[in-house]
Image: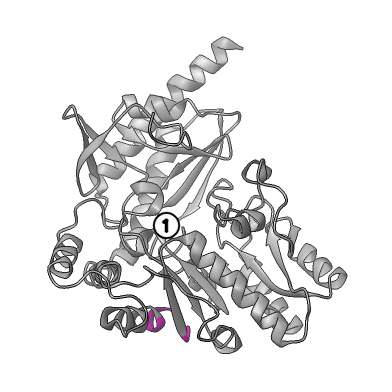
């Protein structure tokens, strides 16, 4: 094998996509309920994105950030308008966006005279696989084999405001809190309704930066442009990636107020970040989401999918909970269920299992009602078959 063995790949090769459908190299069609792990919010081969990429490729791909990039400025303006933030930095991935957030927090801390600034992060979180972002991640499996970890992170349980208060009391060098509004890799964990608003108040009172990792929850996934907007709060720093480019690699770190002034010329950068091609794709995504009202659609479609799943899984004792928001849905089962991924694949459905026993569904925002019901039917049958097999084996 010429590829490094960093993935346990499933036995399928996709060669074509359209909307929520993918076709493999044997011509078989699959319903995509994962969207490239929350990346293809507009589905596959969306004509607006394809046209934007084609037009930009015929004009200019890259110049570097030594010069003004017109579409980068336009994209920054669009995201600032949608988010209420002040400034944007563009990179290539969610991990890089979170690296920028970490550097902002440290620069902010140094400006305040704190020699070794610390950031509060949550258990079961996922922020990336670079050394800094895996150190921020609250998952021992991600850490394993890459020690020593980067210092400067204080870990607390997710959805536990009292733990954050204690951490700030015990660590005088804490300058920021970094959390996901909903934990994705952690198992689609939705915090209590007052968690983010109370966390905002705590950060304000203690003069800490509130940094929200919206890499998976952002760009309409939960039924708002950004998940924290459900709670009427603002972040000091927010990170985006995944669905921002609908498959073209692009990440963004947005900041406001003091955080927006933390990085100066020469303190951070990216060779490819915000190049004309990536920004053209992202602008097409934003424009299309507005025109097709896909943020509102995610809310409606998510409610329908949950209802369809509840009907399909009614009476199944193996189901602990169906949870999520918008089109970010997790089905927690009562024991590890990784084999469901291949069972669903064999049935023509793409899903994912995270945190060992949570089926994760992240379908495209363009999913139709008929496709939603089909997801529930296929997955319901798979879980029933899996549950029956697990019961007979025990």
What's the residue at 41%, 37% (across, down)? 311
x, y percentage for residue 210? 63, 75
Q: Residues within 10 Å of mark 1 (few under 14, many from 20)?
A: many
Label 1's element?
loop
What's the residue at 67%, 75% (across, down)? 106
The span picked out in magenta is 80-86
Above or below 381: residue 64: below
The quadrant of the picture occupied by the N terminus is top left
Give the residue furthest to the right.
170
The reply to whether residue 235 is visible in this rendering is no
Of residues 56 and 223, the one drawn nearer to the viewer in this rendering: 56
Is 87 left or right of 76, judged from the image as shown? right
Residue 91, quarter of the rendered image? bottom left
The reply to whether residue 49 is visible in this rendering is yes
x, y percentage for residue 338? 51, 29
x, y percentage for residue 269? 47, 74
Residue ID for mark 1: 326
Is 239 left or right of 282, judged from the image as shown? right
Residue 376, quarter of the rendered image? top left
What's the residue at 45%, 77% (across, down)? 89
């Amino acid at each position: 094998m010429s590829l490094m063995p960093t993935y346990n790949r499933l036995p399928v090769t996709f060669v074509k996509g359209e909307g929520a459908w993918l076709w493999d190299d044997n011509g078989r069609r699959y319903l995509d309920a994962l969207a490239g792990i929350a990346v293809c919010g507009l589905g596959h081969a969306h004509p607006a994105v394809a046209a934007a990429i084609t037009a930009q490729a015929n004009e200019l791909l890259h110049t570097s950030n030594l010069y003004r990039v017109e579409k980068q400025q336009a994209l920054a303006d669009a995201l600032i308008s949608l988010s209420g933030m002040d400034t944007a930095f563009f990179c290539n991935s969610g991990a890089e966006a979170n690296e920028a957030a970490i550097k902002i927090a440290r620069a902010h801390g140094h400006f305040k005279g704190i020699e070794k600034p610390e950031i509060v992060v949550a258990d079961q979180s996922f922020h990336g696989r670079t050394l800094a972002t895996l150190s921020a991640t609250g998952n021992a499996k991600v850490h394993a084999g890459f020690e020593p970890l980067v210092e400067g992170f204080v870990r607390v349980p997710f959805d536990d405001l009292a733990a954050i208060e204690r951490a700030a009391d015990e660590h005088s060098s804490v300058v920021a809190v970094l959390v996901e509004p909903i934990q994705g890799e952690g198992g689609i964990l939705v915090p209590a309704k007052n968690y983010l608003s109370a966390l905002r108040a705590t950060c304000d009172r203690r003069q800490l930066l509130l940094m929200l990792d919206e890499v998976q929850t952002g760009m309409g996934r939960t039924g708002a442009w950004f998940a924290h907007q459900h709670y009427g709060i603002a972040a000091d720093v927010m990170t985006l990636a995944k669905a921002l480019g609908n498959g073209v690699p692009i990440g963004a770190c947005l900041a406001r107020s003091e955080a927006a002034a933390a990085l100066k010329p020469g303190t951070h950068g990216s060779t490819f970040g915000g190049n004309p091609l990536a920004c053209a794709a992202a602008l097409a995504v934003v424009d299309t989401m507005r025109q097709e009202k896909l943020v509102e659609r995610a809310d409606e479609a998510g409610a329908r999918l949950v209802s369809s799943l509840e009907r399909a899984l009614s009476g199944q004792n193996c189901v602990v909970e169906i949870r999520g928001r918008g089109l970010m849905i997790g089905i927690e089962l009562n024991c590890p269920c990784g084999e469901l991924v291949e069972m669903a694949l064999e049935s023509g459905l793409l899903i994912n299992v995270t945190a060992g026993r949570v089926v994760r569904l992240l379908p495209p925002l363009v999913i139709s009602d008929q496709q939603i019901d089909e997801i529930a039917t296929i997955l319901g049958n798979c879980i029933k078959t899996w549950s029956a097999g697990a019961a007979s084996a025990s």
